[in-house]
């Protein structure tokens, strides 16, 4: 028997939703829609319904491998109900203890950090998640935590001040008192694979990779989802009915980072935030791009497999992974195959993924000694904005000359591509600002970018040329730093 229900903790008690014939909720009903249908959870607001404003932020507490709770702020507008199975959902209504406000609430009130208040629950929840993160929180941590929350009236200074005060003395709170009880309740929840079926939809939630592969072989037209930060918009913005889904998010085998001497294997389900935190020292250019990828709420759920599979011309992890010579490991019931990421993506949003395959892992070889890896992203805003143009570099200099160079650009063609003419020109030349200025002309042979809402073609070309100069500048700083 497959599980046909989800169970989760809300308001300190276990809730169950079964998909039997009476169930009105769809498997693709979002957590936000569900919360707002309840009498006591209207504090979670709907602004954009696409991950851009943070008004819907709630905190999800999950049991980690050591059976400890980890608290993450997420956008409830992009989470389908089955994705909350086995977790604790905490909304703004849950924070106070009777009349006693939680320290983050108290600080926001006493420091006048709210005017109309529409955005305030989202800010509170992002700060609450940071309050529950172990260790001290720096100003940078606060900025990262709040980058996904928009406020249109208060202005950010008072919010940042309130955050600093609240996070200065993190202490025990009502959730710490209840932690042992919460862990026990979550441990009781059945983690079997599930199928949620209604007249119009079938939503599979396997818990092992082998089961997911069998499902994919049987239902090759099923839509895979992992973090749902891309696919969720099909429901919330395009009102599509997704008839057949295989949700990979409960497969723990796909959620691992394995570091070996030859490189790192990243499970396709690993969240971008985890990758950002764990690979900061070993793959600094990857860390750099992830720091400006979406918002913290998006990175908590968005996965590497999802970003690669989307094969967007402005997918932010693609240029840098290609510069690191990353490979994708694809798996089906018939076996595994490895492809260079640069070969995996074949055209606009097209990949070599076969209908019965999933991306299992991404392998990034250990960066070679004496090579410089870098990445840059140009977007209208620093945070929570998609790229207009991005570029990544792998460079080896010997005797002040360019021994080898790889350049990959996003936003310059229908998919992430290497700049062959520019690379050929640069090989063997001195690594100087003059050479890189001259190289700009070769980018015109490599790319014929389009004009769209984000930039004109001429603008994109200029950005790309300037990114070459930026790489030179970054390299100089890096040498100086060394
Ligand atoms: C507000 C907002 C901001 C964003 N900012 C950025 C940004 O700055 N940069 C950027 O590049 N993107 C951005 N995105 C897009 C999105 O977050 C990323 O592409 C993300 O990495 C997708 O991962 P996911 O796990 O959420 O994918 P999902 O939505 O679950 O899936 C995306 C695609 O991948 C497929 N897929 C998922 N897992 C697998 C697998 N294991 N094997 C095969 N196929 C699979 C799905 O079928 C689907 O086609 C943003 C999105 C939002 C809503
Ligand atoms: S409603 Fe705007 S991020 Fe969810
Ligand atoms: S207080 Fe009004 S939007 Fe933030």
Image (spheres, rainbow, N blue to C red):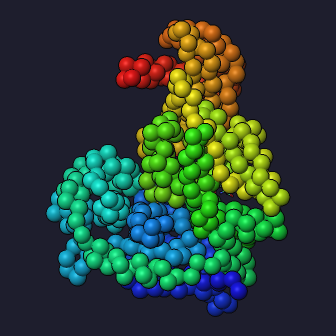
Question: What's the residue at 68%, 55% (across, down)?
Answer: 360
Whether residue 350 sits left or right of residue 7 in the image: it is right
Q: Nearer the viewer, residue 292 or 426?
A: 426
Q: Outermost residue toward the left?
A: 110
Q: Is residue 284 left or right of residue 419?
A: left
Q: Nearer the viewer, residue 434 or 357?
A: 357
Q: Report if residue 273 is visible in the image.
A: yes
Residue at 24% in and 57% down: 167
Location of residue 346 in the rendering, given as x and y in whole percent from the top left corner: 76, 40
Q: Is residue 378 above or below residue 436?
A: below
- Residue 385 can be seen, yes or no: no
On screen, residue 310 above or below 125: above
Report the quarter where the C terminus lies.
top left
Left or right: 158 as drawn, with respect to 121 = left
Report the quarter where the N terminus lies. bottom right
Q: Position of residue 469 (x, y in %)?
A: 50, 19
Name above or below for residue 58 compared with residue 303. below
Q: Nearer the viewer, residue 173 or 127?
A: 173
The single residue placed furthest to the bottom in the displayed view is 22
């Amino acid at each position: 028997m497959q599980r046909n229900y989800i169970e989760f903790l809300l308001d300190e008690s276990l809730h169950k939703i079964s998909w039997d014939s009476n169930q009105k909720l769809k498997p693709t009903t979002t957590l936000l829609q569900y919360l707002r249908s309840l009498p006591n959870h209207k504090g979670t607001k709907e602004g954009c319904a696409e991950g851009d404003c943070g008004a819907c932020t709630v905190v999800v507490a999950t049991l980690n491998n050591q059976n400890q709770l980890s608290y993450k702020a997420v956008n409830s507008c992009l989470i389908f109900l089955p994705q909350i199975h086995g977790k604790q959902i905490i909304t703004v209504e849950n924070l106070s203890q009777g009349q006693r406000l939680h320290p983050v609430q108290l600080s926001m009130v006493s420091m006048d950090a709210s005017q109309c208040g529409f955005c305030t629950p989202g800010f509170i929840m992002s700060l609450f998640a940071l309050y529950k993160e172990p260790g001290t929180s720096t100003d940078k941590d606060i900025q990262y935590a709040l980058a996904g929350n928009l406020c249109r009236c208060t202005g950010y200074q008072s919010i940042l001040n309130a955050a600093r005060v609240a996070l200065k003395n993190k202490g025990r709170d009502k959730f710490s008192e209840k932690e042992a009880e919460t862990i026990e309740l979550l441990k009781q929840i059945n983690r079997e694979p599930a199928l949620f079926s209604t007249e119009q939809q079938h939503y599979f939630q396997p818990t092992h990779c082998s089961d997911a592969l069998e499902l994919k072989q049987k239902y090759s037209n099923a839509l895979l989802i992992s973090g749902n930060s891309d696919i969720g918009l099909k429901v919330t913005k395009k009102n599509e009915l997704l008839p057949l889904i295989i949700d990979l998010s409960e497969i723990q085998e796909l959620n691992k980072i394995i570091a070996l001497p030859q490189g790192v294997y990243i499970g396709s389900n690993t969240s971008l935030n985890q990758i950002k935190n764990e690979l900061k020292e070993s793959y600094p250019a990857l860390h750099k791009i992830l720091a400006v990828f979406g918002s913290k709420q998006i990175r908590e759920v968005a996965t590497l497999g999802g970003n690669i599979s989307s094969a967007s011309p402005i997918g932010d992890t693609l240029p840098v992974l290609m510069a690191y010579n990353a490979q994708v490991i694809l798996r089906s019931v018939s076996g595994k195959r490895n492809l260079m990421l640069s070969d995996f993506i074949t055209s606009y949003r097209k990949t070599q993924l076969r209908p019965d395959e999933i991306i299992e892992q991404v392998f990034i070889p250990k960066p070679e000694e004496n090579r410089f890896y870098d990445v840059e992203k140009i977007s209208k805003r620093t945070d929570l904005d998609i790229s207009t143009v991005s570029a990544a570099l792998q460079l080896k200099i010997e005797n002040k000359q360019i021994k080898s160079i790889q350049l990959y650009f996003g936003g310059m063609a229908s998919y992430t591509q290497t700049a062959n003419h520019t690379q050929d020109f640069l090989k063997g030349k001195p690594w100087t600002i003059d050479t890189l200025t001259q190289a700009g002309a070769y980018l015109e042979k490599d790319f014929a970018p389009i004009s769209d809402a984000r930039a004109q073609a001429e603008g994109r070309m200029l950005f790309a040329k300037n990114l070459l100069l930026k790489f030179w500048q970054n390299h100089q700083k890096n040498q100086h730093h060394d």
